[in-house]
Amino acid sequence: MSSDTALREQICLLARSLFDRGLTGGSTGNISARTCDGGLLVSPTGTSFGRLDPGRLSRFDQSGAFVDGDPPTKEMPLHTAFYDTRSSAGAVVHLHSCHAVAWSMMPEVNEDNFLPPLTPYAIMKLGKVKLLPYFRPGDPQMGQAVRGLAGKRSAVMLANHGPVVAGKDVEAACNAIEELEDTARLAMLMRGYDARTLKPEQISDLVTHFDIDWEQ
């Protein structure tokens, strides 16, 4: 099995897992990953994470030219913005996960640090998540907003829309975006309660111990 074939199957397997557990529904969400030759494999436009076909994924070469497969997601500017600004990005995942979207609507949310420090794991996997304003789906300005972060964030939350996460590979990106959704769910569950969050010194300890890119 070639590495390209294995990657295609891994993308579809992980996407199906996200779909089966209700983390993105219908034909929402998109996913991409770097190939060993520097190109990209991308989920096609209008497709369901539950029914991706490995042989029909959109394929781009290392120069960014479309090579074959079905037409790609309309959110390509969002994906390429992460790849162009973060050299460590090997995959990008975008979902319409319910609790993250719900938390993005809450008036108390910190735009510069979207997730409250409820557990260590979102800090470890995501660093600080930037809340971006609402954009029309497919609007190239989403990509420009990500580029404006100059590669300093591995994850953003599109207000009233959904999270986008870049990771070193497709498994890492999927794990991180699941952690984002889990933390947003906890935030919604704890809303209105005087929850004990992690203390600043505990956050600092995590950042130091795990060498987390924690923009101040």
Image (spheres, rainbow, N blue to C red):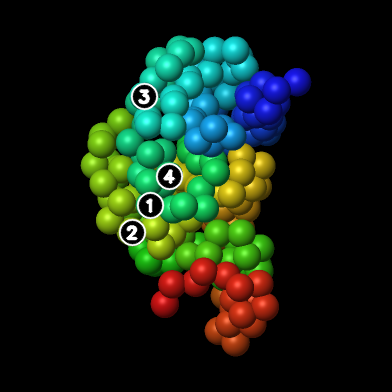
Q: Which element carries disc 2, helix, strand or loop?
A: loop
Secondary-structure class at tag 3: loop
Give the spatial CA distance, label 2 vs label 3.
23 Å
Q: Quadrant of residue 107?
A: bottom left
Mark 4 vs mark 3, CA separation in Å = 14 Å
Q: Amino acid at mark 3?
A: Ala
- Apparent side of residue 55 relative to residue 131 in the rendered image (left or right): right
- The mark that comes first in sequence, 4 or 3, is 3
The tally of labels here is 4
Q: Nearer the viewer, residue 187 or 164?
A: 164
Among the two numbered marks 2 and 1 on one chain, the one whose residue lies closer to the N terminus: 1
Q: Which mark is residue 65?
A: 3
Residue 97's disc is none
Residue 25 in the image, given as x and y percentages of width and height: 54, 27
Pinpoint residue 33: horizontal percent, then vertical percent: 54, 35
**Mark 1 lies on residue:** 85
Report, in whole angstroms, how far the alpha carbon at label 4 lies from the one at label 2: 11 Å
Q: Are marks 2 and 1 in contact (CB under 8 Å)?
A: yes
Q: Dot 4 corresponds to which residue?
A: 83
**Crowd class of label 4 (few under 14; some 14 to 19; many from 20; radius 10 Å):** many
**Circles 4, 2 touching at the beta carbon (< 8 Å):** no
Q: Residue furthest bottom?
A: 201
Q: Regarding mark 1 in the picture, which secondary structure is present there?
A: helix
Q: At 24% across and 42% down in the image, what residue appears?
A: 141
Residue displayed at 58% across by 82% down: 204
